[in-house]
Image (cartoon, rainbow, N blue to C red):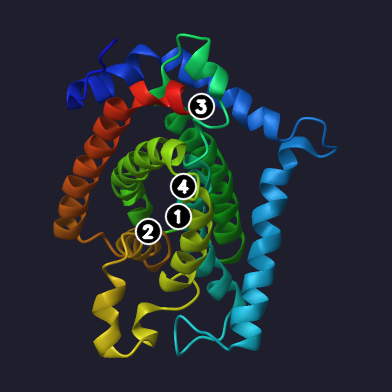
């Protein structure tokens, strides 16, 4: 039986080796989602705008949430909220599909010699595409209402790249686990909903009592959302020490997820 390398070098080598297949699959994934719809890719603009309008109304008008006690600007609230939603949607869209990736593609396991390890990468790139569209909408809104954003937006890739590694590692682990435990998909859906409200997306972390704030930082989404918000809207540079620790942890999570996927993939065909 063929053995699959779990080396960290193989993790990146496989992505490079299959880069053309990944590119083609990601393109098909994005276009296939809207095939047959009247508006097509325009839904990538309308969906986040619609959800942003709903969330802004509910939390800024109904619940009277504020980011800045001195400001009652609905536009400011919407932009700060949207920055957090972009990060969370990237996570949620990828992780929500991760557990069913192998299950939904049994032909790749049984009949075709296919690099299964790229499936989570394709899903992540599809989510990243939608995230970039949303980010473009964010920049356009900021330009219209507040002018050019702060130069600190240039730090954003330094925050997002480690986050992508972290999400990819989780996706590899869940894609494998979902083959053997079918309840994982149900659990993940509930967990994502919980994380959405346990991440400071709709409220500032300072809104929590002091004794609860530290617990929120155990949520791996919290530092990413907070720092993305800082560089995008508030004009603050990232916390480089926290960013360094997060990058190290993300690299370990990515490798562990990849190693688990490689170790268990030999049993996929027997289960499916």
Q: Nearer the viewer, mark 3 or mark 4?
A: 3
Q: Nearer the viewer, mark 1 or mark 3?
A: 3
Residue 95's disc is 4
**3 and 4 marks in contact (CB < 8 Å):** no
* Horizontal side, residue 22 vs residue 253: left or right: right
Of label 1 and label 3, which has the lower sequence position?
Answer: 1
Q: Nearer the viewer, mark 1 or mark 2?
A: 1
Residue labelled with disc 3 = 272
Residue 87's disc is 1
* Horizontal side, residue 130 vs residue 195: left or right: right
- Counting from the top left corner in percent of width and height, residue 199 is at 41, 69
- Spatial CA span between label 3 and label 4: 21 Å
- Spatial CA span between label 4 and label 1: 13 Å
Residue labelled with disc 2 = 228
Q: Quadrant of residue 206?
A: bottom left
Q: Secondary structure at mark 1?
A: helix
Of label 1 and label 2, which has the lower sequence position?
Answer: 1
Q: Secondary structure at mark 2?
A: helix
Count of numbered marks:
4
Q: Secondary structure at mark 3?
A: loop
Of label 2 and label 4, which has the lower sequence position?
Answer: 4
Residue 192 seen anywhere in this rendered image of the structure: yes
Between 167 and 171, the one nearer to me in the picture: 171
Q: Is residue 38 above or below residue 207?
A: above
- Spatial CA span between label 3 and label 2: 40 Å
Q: Residue at x 59, y 80 (%)?
A: 59
* Horizontal side, residue 102 vs residue 46: left or right: left
- Spatial CA span between label 1 and label 2: 8 Å
């Amino acid at each position: 039986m063929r053995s699959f390398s779990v080396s960290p070098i193989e993790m990146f080598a496989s992505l490079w080796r299959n880069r053309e297949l990944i590119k083609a699959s990601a393109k098909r994934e994005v276009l296939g989602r809207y095939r047959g719809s009247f508006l097509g890719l325009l839904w990538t603009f309308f969906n986040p705008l619609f959800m942003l309008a709903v969330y802004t109304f509910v939390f800024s008008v109904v619940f009277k949430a504020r980011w800045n006690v001195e400001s009652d600007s609905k536009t400011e609230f919407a932009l700060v909220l949207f920055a957090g939603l972009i990060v969370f949607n990237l996570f949620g869209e990828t992780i929500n599909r991760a557990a069913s990736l192998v299950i939904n593609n049994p032909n790749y396991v049984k009949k075709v010699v296919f690099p299964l390890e790229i499936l989570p990468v394709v899903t992540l790139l599809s989510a990243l595409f939608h995230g970039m569209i949303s980010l473009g909408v964010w920049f356009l809104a900021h330009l219209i209402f507040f002018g050019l954003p702060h130069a600190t937006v240039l730090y954003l890739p330094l925050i997002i790249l480690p986050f992508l590694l972290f999400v990819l590692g989780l996706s590899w682990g869940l894609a494998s686990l979902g083959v053997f435990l079918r309840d994982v998909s149900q659990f993940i859906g509930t967990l994502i909903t919980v994380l959405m409200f346990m991440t400071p997306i709709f409220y500032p972390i300072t809104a929590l009592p002091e004794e609860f704030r530290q617990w929120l930082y155990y949520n791996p989404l919290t530092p990413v959302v907070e720092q993305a918000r800082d560089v995008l809207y508030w004009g603050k540079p990232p916390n480089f020490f926290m960013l360094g620790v997060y990058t190290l942890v993300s690299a370990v999570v990515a490798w562990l997820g990849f190693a688990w996927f490689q170790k268990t993939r030999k049993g996929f065909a027997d289960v499916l």
